[in-house]
């Protein structure tokens, strides 16, 4: 009996696909309304998920971008001496954490400020080297943004000895990092909730199919069909619904993302200089995730739907 | 070959009352009737053979194989050794006669060539070649039952189990069905017929097993209906 068993198992796998595909297509046709509802639910879930995913990817991207561009500004006292300036400069250049140091004199600072305010330049016209309100400063680029704090401490050790105060975009970085965490958590919650809803809808669709074919399933069992053979068309059907939903959702998201990208032209209206994540990279990640997700929830919903009917 | 060794079955936890200590042996190639009133344990008997349920006590052997030792995954392969004929036919309404029979071969993975070769032979055997492309609702009860028999024997089972095969048929048609079963039996298939049909049992003069309240009351080789109606 065992001998014959393995033999048949082998040959049944060979000829299975044709029958399975035929039954699956028939079943989707017969159940077109519920099938459409399943696909729509997957589309809706994935579009919402997609928005969160793109948001997350972009926030991560922006955070990285901002961190790499981060500068530390050490403002000097208005009455610093050359000795103090050299001491600070040497200390900074010696530090392994510092990538490079540029000195910006008070005159240069005023000039820059005037240029950046071009339309209001007349407002600053009363200032000259005699009454320059701008402090001189060192602009420091660090090797690793994580070391910002330490470099700041190093600079502050010269406090009162030429250094007035130190600033870097601390607030921005912290805000971004916490926003990053927030979007990650939110995406996860949305993922779980929407997955459950989609699985439930697919589960119900497949259950209808299973119910419509319960006689057939009973006969199959008595004639000696294996559970895998009986299960296959239903799982295929669920997976197919999930995949179709995934592809449609991806197309909608892709079109929309490029459209929005065209509108804002990469400008994020953030107080820091950052660009949107490269669309091609995002889309690559997205389609991969969507197909995996669509197929997975389709299969899971089907497996649950057919479990009860297999016990004969 | 079917063997029951002290088999009891209870659906309640502490009672074994559906079948009580049944022992019997049906040899390869035998033709056996199983009779008894409703609730005597006939359905339980068949369900045990198909491993739909497991015996509470005792052992069921089919072709020298201990059925209760089968894992869930092996059950389908046990069922491929048996053909089953139901009282209510259980044909697929949306498939033609040919497709219904072919279906049983598709399920266990036979090739298209084998199917095309064997289905007409099986339909010829039950005398339905001319109805090949009809659908079940276009057939009479007797014809439907013949399709079911063709489906049951298409995979060459060693045992054919018939659960009230003539229960929905008139006497004349019933005899046609039984003579088809006899012909199948002549080719070496063990046949077990569960029936209420006293007349058929008495004229066939085959071995009769009689169940009464879960007990095997009579095992008569000469073919007498074992209880008075």
Image (tube, rainbow, N blue to C red):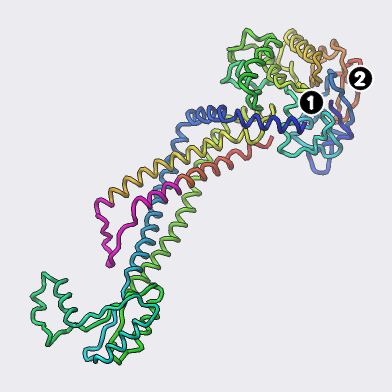
Query: Visible in this render: residue B78?
Result: no
Q: Secondary structure at mark 2?
A: strand
Q: Which image quadrant: the N terminus of chain A? A: top right
Residue A47: % across, % down: 39, 48
In the visual, does A150 lie left or right of A225? Answer: left
Q: Position of residue A100 (x, y in %)?
A: 32, 76
Instruction: Answer with left or right where residue B39 lies relative to residue A234.
Output: right
Picture coordinates of residue A202, whole percent (x, y): 51, 41
The magenta segment is: A261-290
Q: Which residue lies under the disc numbered 2?
A: B220
- Chain ID, mark 2: B
Q: Residue B24 falls in which quadrant of the image?
A: top right
As drawn, A121 above or below B24: below
Are there few (<14), some (14-19), or many (20+) residues within 10 Å of tag 1?
few
State the quadrant of the C terminus of chain A.
top right
Q: Dot 1 falls on which chain?
A: B
- The alpha-carbon separation of the residues under discs 2 and 1 comes to 20 Å
If you read the primary sequence from the N terminus, does the residue marked by circle 2 or circle 1 appear first?
1
Please name the residue that numbered disc 1 is placed on: B38
Residue at 71% x, 38% y: name it: B73
The answer to whether A49 is drawn above or below residue B100 in the figure is: below
Q: Does A121 sit left or right of B227 as displayed?
A: left
Q: Name the one closer to the observer, A169 or B161.
A: A169
Q: Quadrant of residue A275?
A: bottom left
Indicate whether B43 appears above or below A132.
Answer: above
Estimate the x, y position of residue A125 in percent, counting from the top left: 8, 79
Q: Which mark is residue A304?
A: none
Query: What residue do we see at 47% from left, 38% from top?
Result: A241
Q: Quadrant of residue B38?
A: top right
């Amino acid at each position: 009996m065992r001998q014959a068993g393995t033999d048949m198992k082998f040959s049944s796998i060979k000829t299975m696909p044709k029958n399975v595909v035929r039954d699956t297509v028939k079943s989707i046709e017969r159940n077109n309304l519920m099938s459409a509802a399943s696909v729509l639910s997957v589309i809706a879930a994935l579009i919402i998920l997609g928005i969160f995913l793109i948001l997350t990817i972009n926030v991560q991207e922006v955070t990285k971008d901002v961190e790499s561009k981060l500068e530390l500004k050490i403002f000097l006292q208005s009455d610093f001496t050359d000795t103090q300036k050299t001491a600070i400069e040497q200390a900074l250049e010696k530090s392994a954490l510092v990538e490079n140091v540029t000195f910006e004199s008070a005159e240069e600072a005023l000039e820059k400020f005037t240029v950046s305010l071009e339309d209001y330049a007349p407002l600053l016209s009363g200032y000259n080297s005699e009454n320059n309100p701008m402090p001189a400063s060192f602009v420091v680029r660090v090797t690793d943004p994580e070391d910002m704090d330490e470099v700041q401490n190093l600079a502050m050790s010269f406090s009162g000895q030429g250094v007035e105060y130190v600033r870097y975009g601390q607030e921005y970085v912290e805000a971004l990092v916490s926003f990053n965490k927030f979007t990650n958590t939110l995406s996860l919650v949305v993922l779980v909730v929407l997955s459950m809803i989609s699985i439930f809808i697919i589960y119900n669709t497949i259950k209808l199919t299973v119910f419509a074919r319960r006689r057939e399933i009973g006969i199959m069992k008595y004639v000696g069909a294996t559970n895998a053979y009986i299960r296959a068309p239903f799982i295929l059907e669920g997976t197919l619904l999930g995949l179709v939903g995934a592809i449609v959702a991806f197309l909608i998201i892709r079109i929309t993302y490029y459209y929005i990208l065209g509108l804002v032209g990469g400008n994020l209206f953030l107080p820091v200089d950052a660009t949107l994540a490269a669309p091609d990279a995002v889309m690559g990640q997205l389609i991969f995730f969507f197909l995996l997700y669509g197929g997975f929830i389709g299969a899971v919903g089907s497996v649950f739907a057919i479990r009860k009917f297999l016990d004969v | 070959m079917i063997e029951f060794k002290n088999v009891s079955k209870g659906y309640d936890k502490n009672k074994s009352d559906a079948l009580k200590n049944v022992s019997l042996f049906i040899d390869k190639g035998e033709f056996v009737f199983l009779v008894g009133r409703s609730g005597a344990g006939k359905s339980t008997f068949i369900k045990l053979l198909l491993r739909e349920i497991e015996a509470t006590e005792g052992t069921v052997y089919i072709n020298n194989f201990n059925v209760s030792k089968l894992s869930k995954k092996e059950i389908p392969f046990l069922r491929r050794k048996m053909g089953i004929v139901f009282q209510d036919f259980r044909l697929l309404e949306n498939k033609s006669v040919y497709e219904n029979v072919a279906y049983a071969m598709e399920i266990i993975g036979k090739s298209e060539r084998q199917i095309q070769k064997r289905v007409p032979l099986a339909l010829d055997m039950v005398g339905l070649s001319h109805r090949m492309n009809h659908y079940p609702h276009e057939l009479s009860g007797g014809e439907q039952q013949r399709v079911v028999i063709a489906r049951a024997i298409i995979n060459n089972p060693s045992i054919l189990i018939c659960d009230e095969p003539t229960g929905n048929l008139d006497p004349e048609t019933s005899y046609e069905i039984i003579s088809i079963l006899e012909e199948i039996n002549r080719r070496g298939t063990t046949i077990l017929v569960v029936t209420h049909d006293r007349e058929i049992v008495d004229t066939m003069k085959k071995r009769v097993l009689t169940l009464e309240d879960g007990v095997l009351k009579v095992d008569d080789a000469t073919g007498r209906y074992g209880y008075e109606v």
